[in-house]
């Protein structure tokens, strides 16, 4: 059992000196000394009270009658992997289910931002996520969400996070810092609430997560950096990553289920030869199918290596760099005395098979099998009844009225494997007074599921390739998590909305009146408390159903769920309407050449 370092210190000294027996000794390994990026053969590691006491050539004096022994057999001993930025809810799992899924892949530490549940349940949702995280056999640190809603005035969340709540949460056990500061225009404009949240975090000596989702590296970028964000995961090019690092911000390079941003940025190290200390690997969003079938941080490290990164540097970017970034270098990130005994045993530093995993001195997984329990909390009914549409919409509710025989419309253009979208236009036919989607263009709608107001916004989207008669609905719709529906048939969209309310959250795929797939997500409409394998199977059936509906896009559901993310350019849709993210303003689906000036967010900077 892990003890705080001050309590463990006397025994660590005794074990290291050979005067007391260790709880566990891992023998005969090749030690990755991550601080110097050296491989040291014939090394033993002695562990006591969940922490490393000794790393050296012979731990024989540390072995007593009750000491457990593990023979590494000449294999590599590397630090447990750290995910420095992610959202547990994106796995469609609660923290316990997520931990159970990633432990066999070598993840021993997670820094997660539960801003998804914060947008549904507010501070109470954050507390519930924190509570379950603290029960896990690995280290799960919670970042207090900074933005609920993420784009005030552009969307409606189920709850609002205040600066007072942020300051309050900084005193909670398990809260490591502030979650990604997504309202970057407000920070750059000097918004008092956003600056107060950052200041409260810094005053508590904790780390501020960043999110500057703009290619503009001019004055707004410099103002955002001056605001106090310590990192950014929204970079997609080498130049963007380097710009952050030059300003002292960590560049978090992500490989999630749908975000493939490592390859374009790892060249800062592999080609440009920059110091890797402020480059960190992360996942951001990984759904359950990816976790079960492909891996977690081991997948990201392999990907970086496959694109030319030295394996030792790639591992450093997923261990020591992350620990140092959060001020936890004395606790995590290396196989050195005093640190938590998080150790991976692997026979190959390039292929990175995860053959044994120790977390806090306990063997938690071996040969892909989970060996420990991941305890769950009892999620209250208040977290399980979160979908309230009021009166169910009919097919007509999804129509966009227009005059004449055709209309020029704005279209959200999805970009495969990237978070940003394009702001496109198209000319569509008008039939019976309503604009008709077709070809590559589908309808998209967002329904208020938090307050039963009956509010619906409508628009158009391209890139999914759905055939006629299709609708895909989801209560997962970043970040406010209203009910999001994409469809080529308004009747199918109405049927899909009814399916989501019946499940009290989840995903439904409809074609020609038939339900092809359902993924129940009853916890806040975002997560399931069932096993990861079960959720992954349902998610895989959903993916197959989306393909049967004509979609060939990689991880299309991730792209689907981000259509409402009003803080990443260029065009999004919220419950209040279409959002021009570049201008941080609401706009209309039908282009009115003589329309009134767009509604603008208070304190937002003028558009470029």
Image: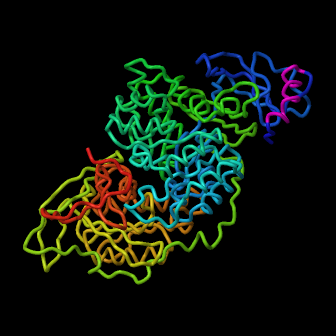
Residue 24 visible? The answer is yes
- Across and down, in percent, residue 546 comes to 34, 61
Q: Return the x and y of residue 533 as percentages of the image width and height.
A: 55, 56
Q: Is residue 151 above or below residue 17?
A: below
The segment highlighted magenta reads 5-18
Tell which of 373 and 165 is nearer to you.
165
Please indicate whether residue 425 sits to the left or right of residue 575 in the image: left
Q: Residue furthest left?
A: 405
Q: Residue at x 81, y 21 (%)?
A: 59
352 horizontally vs 173: left or right? left
Asked which quadrant contains residue 246, the reply is top left
State the residue at coordinates (41%, 28%): 266
Quadrant of the image occupied by residue 483: bottom left
Is residue 288 among what the camera can see?
A: no
Residue at x 55% of width, y 39% of height: 84
Q: Is residue 494 magenta?
A: no
Nearer to us in this view, 187 or 249: 187
């Amino acid at each position: 059992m892990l003890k705080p370092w001050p309590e463990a210190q006397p025994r660590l000294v005794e074990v290291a000196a050979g005067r007391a027996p260790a709880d566990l000794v891992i023998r005969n390994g090749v030690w990755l000394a991550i601080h110097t990026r050296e491989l040291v053969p014939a090394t033993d590691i002695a562990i006591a009270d969940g922490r490393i006491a000794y790393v050296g050539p012979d731990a024989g004096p540390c072995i007593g009658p009750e000491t457990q022994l593990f023979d590494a057999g000449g294999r590599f001993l590397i630090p447990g992997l750290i995910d420095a930025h992610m959202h547990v809810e994106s796995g469609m799992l609660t923290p316990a289910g997520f931990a159970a899924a990633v432990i066999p892949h070598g993840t021993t530490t997670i820094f997660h931002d539960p801003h998804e549940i914060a947008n549904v349940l507010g501070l109470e949702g954050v507390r519930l996520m924190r509570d379950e995280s603290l029960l896990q056999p690995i280290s799960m640190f919670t970042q207090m969400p900074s933005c609920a809603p993420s784009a005030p005035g552009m969307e409606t969340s189920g709850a609002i996070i205040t600066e007072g709540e942020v300051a309050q949460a900084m005193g909670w056990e398990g809260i490591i810092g502030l979650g990604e500061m997504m309202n970057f225009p407000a920070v750059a404009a000097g918004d008092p609430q956003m600056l107060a949240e950052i200041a409260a975090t810094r005053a508590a000596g904790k780390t501020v997560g960043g999110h500057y989702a703009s290619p503009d590296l001019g004055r707004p970028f410099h103002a955002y950096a001056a605001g106090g964000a310590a990192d950014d995961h929204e970079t997609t090019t080498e130049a963007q990553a380097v710009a952050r690092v030059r300003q002292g911000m960590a560049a978090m390079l992500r490989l999630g289920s749908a975000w493939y941003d490592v390859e374009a940025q790892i060249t800062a190290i592999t080609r440009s030869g920059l110091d890797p200390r402020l480059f960190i690997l992360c996942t951001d969003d990984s759904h359950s199918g990816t976790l079960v079938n492909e891996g977690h941080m081991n997948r990201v490290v392999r990907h970086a290596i496959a694109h030319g990164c030295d394996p030792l540097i790639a591992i450093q970017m997923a261990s020591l760099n992350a620990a140092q970034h959060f001020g936890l270098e004395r606790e995590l990130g290396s196989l050195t005395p005093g640190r938590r005994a998080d150790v991976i045993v692997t026979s190959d530093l390039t292929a990175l098979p995860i053959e044994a995993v120790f977390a806090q001195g306990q063997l938690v997984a071996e040969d892909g099998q989970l060996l420990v329990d991941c305890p769950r909390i009892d999620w209250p009914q208040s977290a399980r009844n979160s979908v309230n549409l009021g009166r169910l919409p009919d097919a007509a509710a999804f129509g966009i009225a227009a005059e004449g025989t055709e209309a020029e419309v704005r279209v959200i253009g999805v970009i495969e494997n990237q978070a940003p979208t394009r702001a496109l236009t198209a000319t569509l036919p008008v039939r019976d007074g309503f604009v008709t989607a077709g070809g590559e263009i589908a309808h998209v709608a967002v329904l208020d599921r938090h307050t039963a107001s009956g509010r619906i916004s409508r628009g158009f989207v391209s890139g999914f390739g759905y055939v006629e008669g299709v609708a895909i609905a989801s209560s997962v719709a970043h970040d406010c998590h209203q009910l999001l529906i994409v469809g080529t048939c308004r009747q199918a969209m109405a049927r899909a909305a009814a399916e989501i309310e019946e499940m009290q959250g989840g995903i439904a795929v409809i074609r020609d009146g038939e339900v092809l797939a359902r993924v129940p997500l009853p916890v806040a409409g975002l997560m399931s408390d069932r096993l990861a394998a079960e959720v992954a199977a349902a998610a895989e059936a959903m993916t197959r159903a989306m393909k049967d509906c004509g979609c060939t896009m990689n991880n299309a559901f991730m792209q689907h769920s981000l259509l409402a993310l009003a803080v990443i350019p260029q065009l999004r849709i919220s419950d209040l309407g279409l959002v021009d993210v570049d201008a941080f303003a609401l706009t209309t689906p039908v282009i009115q050449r003589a329309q009134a000036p767009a509604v603008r967010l208070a304190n937002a900077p003028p558009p470029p």
